[in-house]
Amino acid sequence: MTNLRTRLALTYSLVIISAVVVLSFVSNILANQLFAGYVKDSIQRKNTEIVSAMANQYDSSRNRFNTGTVQTLGMSFLHDGFILVLKDNNNRTVWDARACDLDLCADVIKDIQSRTNHKMDHVELMKEEFPLIQNGKKVGTIVVESFGPLFYTENESNFLAAFNKFVIVIGAIFAILSAIVSIIISSRISKPILNAASTAEKIEHGDFSARVDEQSKTVELNQLAKSINGLALALENGEQWQKRVTSDISHELRTPLTTLQGNFEAMIDGVVKPTPERIQSCYEEVVRLNKLVEDLKQLSILERENIHIHKTQVDLFSILKSVVNQHFVDADSKGIQLHLEGKPSPYIGDANRLTQVFVNLLSNAIKYTDHGEIIVSLKLNRKNEYEISFKDTGIGVSEEEIPHLFERFYRADKSRNRKTGGAGIGLTISKSIIDAHEGVIQVESELGKGSCFTIILSTNI
Ligand code: ADP
């Protein structure tokens, strides 16, 4: 198994080097072809030059060729790689390069062969015959033997070799550069991935505070870092939640259990008599504990297992009405007047959960009110949202305590509330349910004057 960095570097290098090789190869072939065309043209031009030069050597006044200059010209053309045979009109040889200088001729042929590279192995000695025309009259024939169809002069073959070398060197430089760039790019890509992997490994081993710090310029890598950080945060929150709940629960259960234990021990040891009142008081404590455990279960479901809301079309006013009806007796027994205001209000929500919230708010209002009245009202506010309020003339809570009311196990003025039997979970549960309905729950209260708990829900029909 190769690592990502090596794999990326190899892939990049392979692609770029292949591109460079193909480009060098194609440009080399193209340049060679263009050059070959140029060389062919120059051979043809040379043939025309030879024919014209030799025709000019015919002396029409003497009806013969000027052999002296023919020889000079012939030797000069021989040096350029053209082996000539000049014949007169009677097909008699006037000048023959081979007959004249066999050794030089052989040397020229050898030299030419050594300069034709392997790509030109189709090069062979080509023989062409041209009539020599002077003033419109044929004065003889020239036979030109040259290496073709491609023959490079020394300068030409030097140029071609230099060009080929140049292409190879440039190709090699680009290949090396591309390999270096590939390594840099691949490490840039692999580094944040490796970082993310090592953070994920830390998280796997229980270090939920680990985070991927590196900000990458790549969207996907940033997304990966964000997801891992989100996962770590969720796990960290979960872990903190678990620790908090464990400590809260043990704290909340310890006090009533210790009281119960003390009471029972005293009764068993005969220190106090097990009177019906004492047993009743212990029983009430057990009931309270039971309720606490039930509330904790509810809270755990709501907070940990993501609240399951079964939304249907409901009438908020009907729900309120039935909750208020259930509490008339309680309110009446405390001499509190209970009023309900509002009108049918359709809403998509979970009737059971909303009932749970309304019951909690109304029973709290009754619990913390000794006299006066409680007004439960449902109306539309200026923003066209439902506003459901529970206003009482009860004991109220102080300004400092208001922000904590929705915290788990929070009880305003704890000593006072221990007697009322509340565990301080009801409002936390209510808030979770309202949050799940994307609503808001808020409170206004004044110590000694009363409280008003308000729920705001958007009109979602
Ligand atoms: P509890 O079971 O203690 O009532 P809640 O979460 O329902 O738990 O309420 C938390 C605390 O908020 C209560 O202990 C009480 O101090 C305060 N509280 C709630 N409702 C009212 C109210 N209507 N009037 C005064 N105090 C209230």
Image: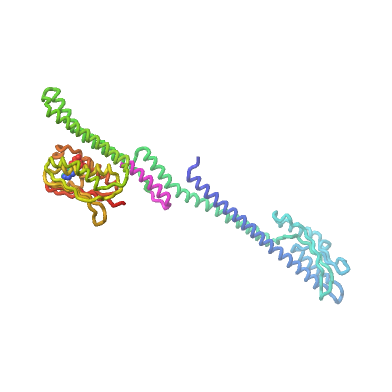
Please say whether residue 233 is one of the residues in the magenta stretch. Answer: yes
**Residue 366's image quarter?**
top left
Residue that lies at the very extreme toward the top in this rendered image: 269
Q: Which residues are magenta?
A: 214-237
Residue that lies at the very extreme toward the right in this rendered image: 90
Please say whether residue 440 is one of the residues in the magenta stretch. Answer: no
**Residue 231's image quarter?**
top left
| Between 274 and 135, the one nearer to me in the picture | 274
Q: Is residue 397 visible?
A: no
Q: Is residue 2 visible?
A: yes
Q: Left or right: 366 with respect to 306?
A: left
| Between 22 and 315, the one nearer to me in the picture | 315
Q: Position of residue 336 (x, y in %)?
A: 13, 44
Q: Left or right: 81 with respect to 203?
A: right
| Between 355 and 442, the one nearer to me in the picture | 355
**Residue 64's image quarter?**
bottom right
Q: Position of residue 375 (x, y in %)?
A: 17, 48
Q: Quadrant of ligand 1?
A: top left
**In the rendered view, would you say 307 is above or below 259?**
below
Q: Left or right: 221 with respect to 380?
A: right
Q: Position of residue 298 (x, y in %)?
A: 27, 38
